[in-house]
Image: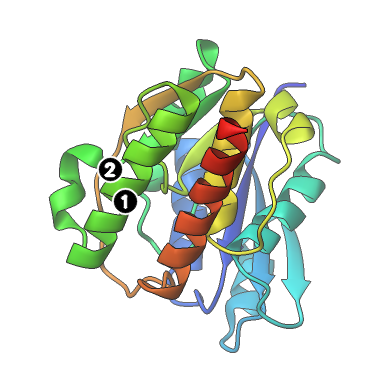
Amino acid sequence: MTGVACVIPAYNAASTLEAVARGLRAALPGVLLIAIDDGSSDPTHAVALASCDRVVRHSANRGKGAALRAGFAVALNEPVWAVATVDADGQHDPARAPELVDALSTADLAIGSRARTRGKMPLGRRITNALASAAVGAIVGASVPDAQSGYRAMRREVVERVHARGDRYEYETEFLIAAARAGYTIASVDVPTVYGVPSHFRAWGDSMRVVRAIWNHRTVERR
C-alpha cells in the first residue's frame, strides 16, 4: 500500500471546495480525494464530482462526525497506507498536508495544530479550543495543543481500529481520546489559523457536545 487518501467533509462548500481539492493535488501528487457532501443545499455536490475522485452524498445534513465516518469507510476500501482529513471551507492550508503525512514516520496520528496562532480565532472558538485541548491532554496524559483541529493524518491501522461515537464535532475529540487510549502515538504539526469564511461550528451547541464528550471520558476514567 503506497497511497494516501484525503477525506473532505463538505457542507455548503461550493465556493471553496475546488480550491481545496486543487491545493491538495498540488501538495500530495497522487492523493485520492474523497468528498462527503453532507446534505448541502448549494452546488457542493457538483463541485465535488468535478474535483474529487470519490464522492458520497448525504440526502440530509448528518454532521461532521457522520461525514468523516462515511469517508473513512470509502478510504479503507482503497489501497492506501494513510488517511488525511481536511475541511472543505478553506480554513486549512492544503500546502501543509505533506508535513502531516511526513509526521507519520514517527507517529500514528498527526494533528495540524493552530495553538501558536490561536489568537486569530474568534473569541468563543479560542476559549473552547484552549480548554478542550487542555482537558483532552489531561485525559490522555500527553500534550495535545489543538484537540479540535480537523486537519489530521493517520496511519491506516488507526482508522481501521479506532471507533468514535457522535455524529457532529464531538466525533473528532472522541476519536483522538480513543486513539490515545488504544496506545497510538500523536504528533502535532504547526499550521496557520485561517479564517476567511464562516465556520459551521456553532459556539454554544457544538461546544456543549465537545464538553459532554470530554466529561463522559473523564467519568469513565475515574471508575
Q: Residue at x 82, y 38 (%)?
A: 78
Image mark for residue 185: none
159 versus 43 height, above or below: above
Q: Residue furthest right?
A: 77
Pointer 2 with pointer 1, Cβ within 8 A: yes
> Viewer-proximal residue, 59 or 208?
208
Q: Amino acid at mark 2?
A: Arg
Number of residues whose C-alpha sits closer than 10 Å to that of mark 2, classed few (under 14), some (14–19) or many (20 or more):
many
> Viewer-proximal residue, 52 or 150?
150
Q: Amino acid at mark 1?
A: Asn
Q: Secondary structure at mark 1?
A: helix
Q: Residue at x 37, y 51 (%)?
A: 92
Q: Secondary structure at mark 2?
A: loop
Circle 2 is placed at which residue position? Answer: 114
In this picture, residue 208 sits left or right of residue 181: left
Q: Residue at x 23, y 56 (%)?
A: 126
Image mark for residue 129: 1
Relative image position of residue 157 (x, y in whole percent): 74, 24
3 versus 125 height, above or below: above
- Quadrant holding the N terminus: top right
Question: Which of pointers 2 and 1 lies earlier in the amino acid sequence?
Answer: 2
Count the marks: how many? 2
